[in-house]
Image (cartoon, helix red, strand yellow):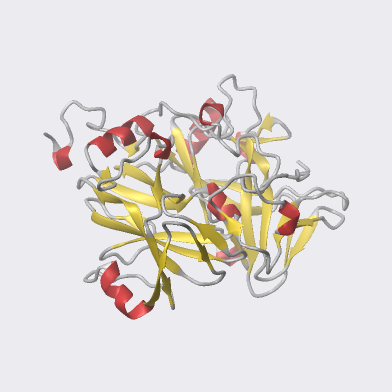
Amino acid sequence: MGIGGQVEGSPLGGLAGVLPSQALREAVQLEWVSAGELRIPSASVQPASLDLRLGEHAWALRCSFLPDNRSTVEEKLQDIAFDRIDLRDGATLERDRPYLVPLVEELRLPEHVRARANPKSSTGRLDVFTRVITDRSHRFDEIAPGYEGKLYLEVLPRSFAIRVKARIALNQVRLICGQARLSDADLLAAHERSPLLHLDSSPLQASELSLASGLFLSLGISSRPEDIVGYRAKRNSLPVDLTSSASLKWRDYWEPVHPERGGKIVLEPEVFYLLLSAEGVSIPPPYAAEMLAYDPTAGELRTHYAGFFDPGFGYSPTGEGAGSRAALEVRARDVPFMVEHRQPVCRLAFERMAQVPDLLYGEQLRSNYQGQQTMLSKHFVTRASATVER
């Protein structure tokens, strides 16, 4: 046996980078990730991540928190939780109330493996703010090498109340060995081999890439006032049922956003918007990516909840594709804030896969957002398309 129960000669031996689907299956067999008496279903395994499922109850909290280096999550809960909610038959979580849910999955990581969590794409598109908490840690979503213990998910519905049920997945986790992040020089070389960003159906030239420890993406906003360029969340809508897909009328929850002349829109403060990137993104199989929050020094703006981009997102093995545009979850802070066509709003950091995954995002997984022309989540019956001026 190797470190942390690793079988010598197994596919996990000597890997460096983000663990792919085939390695995640073996990590489950080795009980680096376990679910107690419950089986981890094959559908939980994604190309570069593993879905994390809600447990059977949630605690309503009076505030968010982090444990310190000496405390467990449940020790901290004694002063913060005020109600226990049964999720086995489903329950509605109120808007603007933080909840904490013990997750089904637990971790028993080797000393050389760390983990990072992020919301699933559909979670972010519904303005549901989530982050994973672990015992004796002062950081959200970052799980230390060698961590052994339970996982907890903080859930904060912002624009809509949500209906959830035990065993559904709102978050996912990546397992990482060693240094995986690509430098800007690495990104340029990767873009030369297989273009990562496209515009007007053509790959961007290397000189057109905006680099800063990742690739910047910009907003796509049509200049025609009659076009729909995004969606603004309505307040006081009925709860969104996360347990079913394609069951809701989008106009009951969203207002279409039309641009001002010249390709610009004014974001109202503390209102949630769904927009699209101008660029088409392509993630070749040897890489994964993560969308990073916008630098607040560049404006009173926050972008993104859903951060992971899987290998195969927007990728065409023939090289003839133009990528898939990225959904951008945007909220202005404090004051109305104008954004314009091709304004940089977020950054994609790329990481090496430890191996090319045996599953890729796209038709192979019937992925919901490959080649997307709208940014609305899978829960809505009619997904009206947004028009983007390239």
In the depicted view, which residue is nearer to us: 235 or 317?
A: 235
Give the image location of residue 312, x and y in percent.
52, 31
With 93 as the anchor, is 245 left or right in this view? right
In this orientation, does residue 340 appear? no
In this orientation, does residue 324 appear? yes
Give the image location of residue 229, x and y in percent.
77, 50
Looking at the rendered structure, the number of numbered marks drawn on it comes to: 0
In the depicted view, which residue is nearer to us: 356 or 346?
A: 356
Judge whether 267 appears above or below 247 on screen.
Answer: below
Give the image location of residue 100, x and y in percent.
40, 66
Q: In the rendered image, which quarter contains the C terminus?
A: top right
Q: In the rendered image, which quarter contains the N terminus?
A: top left
With 28 as the anchor, is 279 left or right in this view? right
Residue found 28% across the figure and 55% down from its top: 144
Identify the image quadrant of residue 79.
bottom left
Which residue sits furthest left? 1
Identify the image quadrant of residue 287.
top left
Which residue sits furthest front? 89
In the depicted view, which residue is nearer to us: 11 or 262?
A: 11
With 36 as the anchor, is 199 left or right in this view? right
Which residue sits furthest top? 318
Residue found 18% across the figure and 36% down from its top: 6
Give the image location of residue 316, x and y in percent.
58, 25
Residue found 55% across the figure and 71% down from its top: 96
